Image: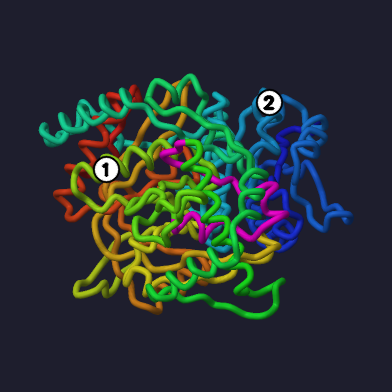
Amino acid sequence: MPKKVIYLLANGDLRASANQKCEREQLLMEAKLIKTLKAEGWTVKRAHGFRKEVGHSFIDSQKYGMEIFRKIPVDAPLIVAEAVWQYSHHILHGLSTHQAPILTVANWSGTWPGLVGMLNLNGSLTKAGVKYSSLWSEDFTDAKFLNGLRSWLRTGKVTHPTPHVRPLNRAKLPAASLRLGQRFAQEFRKHKAILGVFDEGCMGMYNAIIPDELLQPTGLYKERLSQSSLYAKMLTVSDAEATAALRWLERKGMKFAWGKNEKTELTKRQTLEQLKMYIASVRIADEFGCATIGIQYQQGLKDLAPASDLVEGLLNNRDRPPVRHEKTGKVLFEGEALPHFNEVDECAGLDGLVTYRLWNELGYEPENTLHDLRWGRHYKGKSGNRQLDAYVWVFLISGAAPPAHFIGGFRGTTSERQPAMYFRLGGGTVKGISKPGWIVWSRVFVEDGKLKYDTGIGEVVTLPKEETQDRWQQTTSQWPIMHVVLQGVDRDQMMARHKSNHIQVVYAPSKAAAVQGLAAKAAAFRELGLEVAVCGTV
């Protein structure tokens, strides 16, 4: 092997259409990275090339990933470069047994979810106990990136300072809220609840699966359900029931961007199919006694039905179309949300159910959701009636946010077709702009064989229409967006610490209420056995 050689991997999606569409951005990112590495005196060997039969050069399956790793020397330094969404299990096997330094790198861009993909891989590596380092940059020439890269090239590791993180016992939080959270958790664990899982392991998210032996001490137990059962239940839902649900949404003011071309546009038929899935999922949850459910959708169900995002957003909303029991006619979960964890992320499922029940006890609006930690940039200018000069994150998810989070509620909600590159059979999103206010953010994750919990507060801010539209165009315009200023956590600190592509959010009535809610939740999770850290200024 030539001296000073680094092997480079580009891990991608399972879907050829997504990989083909994202190929150009990936190669542009790699070219910048390779140029920087060459300037440091290193040769880069891309471990795999373009394949005519699939039309792209990504690793697109676990099978192909194993073929590639058989050709990579186990003692060669390795970079996983990500400008796109990737399925971590395609390469996790090889990274788990690699004997040389590993570096994950993402371009700081919202064009495709490269940052999201890298964070998922990082969370998966963390859960698997694999040592790795991580870097990110807009153009791979800035001083911070170069210093980190040189450290990795010299020592095999990069360390990022995380002074914003402190254990719960060192955080000054309201004592009454801490006691409330502890009492709540004791009752939660005592009464137990069921987490309905419609097929585990969505899109290779190893980090999103909680082992039963870690989950059960919290009082939450899995009911493993099949997406084939969900599809079968959809077939029992009548056209009249789906139409009634649609009319309910239209009366509330929700809008649907319907067209006629099934391949590229959202159609009324697709929306009605999604509403059949919504009704079916509520009935299955009732049948099995689930307090929360997660639909994987990918893979499997995507080959049979439109996307599940409209379903998920409605489930997370207390005010939603009524679903009746097939025989008795009783309204199921009346007046309540049925918390849904998007992409069957069980860490979000545990967090979401605890949040929903605890927020009810606090008297706060309990609707909550996960978002992708998609991207962000500094903003200086008008924000409502004030001037803002801050780093504003783009929290963006594929449609599962509840209308209660949006400006205008249902009247501020539209449903647009999911991009065909990801969702061949279409289906609509639940799109809106998140209302200004204070939130508690959090993440449950697995590290060192233990469940851990990070939390902090943030402010959802209003941005001018032009800025919002530009951020949508820089990312995915069909999806719901949240503009967030994290308190006491800068961009690089967040990236250094966060062990997931997902972040959980819930509103509080005020900043003071957010602190009280954070304290109660943190104490609750500590009582449930999680290792709790408070992040940023609280």
Quarter placement of the C terminus: top left
The amino acid pointed to by label 1 is: Gly
How many other residues sit within 10 Å of disc 2, few (<14), some (14-19) or many (≥20)? many
Residue annotated with mark 2: 98
Q: Secondary structure at mark 1?
A: loop
Most foreground residue, 55 or 190: 190
x, y percentage for residue 487? 26, 50
Which residue appears farthest toward the right when viewing the image?
53
Residue drawn at (57%, 33%) of the image? 224
x, y percentage for residue 273? 61, 63
Residue 322 seen in render: yes
Q: How many marks?
A: 2
Would you identify the image quadrant in which residue 225 lies?
A: top right
**Residue 259 vertical position relative to residue 144 in the rendered view, above or below:** below
Q: Is residue 228 left or right of residue 492?
A: right
Q: Which mark is residue 499?
A: none
**Residue 361 vertical position relative to residue 241 in the rendered view, above or below:** above
Residue drawn at (55%, 51%) of the image? 280
Residue annotated with mark 1: 536
Q: Is residue 452 magenta?
A: no
Q: Secondary structure at mark 2?
A: loop
The amino acid pointed to by label 2 is: His
Looking at the picture, the colour scheme in use is rainbow
Residue drawn at (37%, 40%) of the image? 353
x, y percentage for residue 527? 27, 24
Most foreground residue, 497 or 264: 264
Residue drawn at (49%, 34%) of the image? 158
Most foreground residue, 112 or 239: 239
How many other residues sit within 10 Å of disc 1, few (<14), some (14-19) or many (≥20)? many
Q: Is residue 292 magenta?
A: yes
Q: Which residues are magenta?
A: 289-314
Most foreground residue, 315 or 488: 315
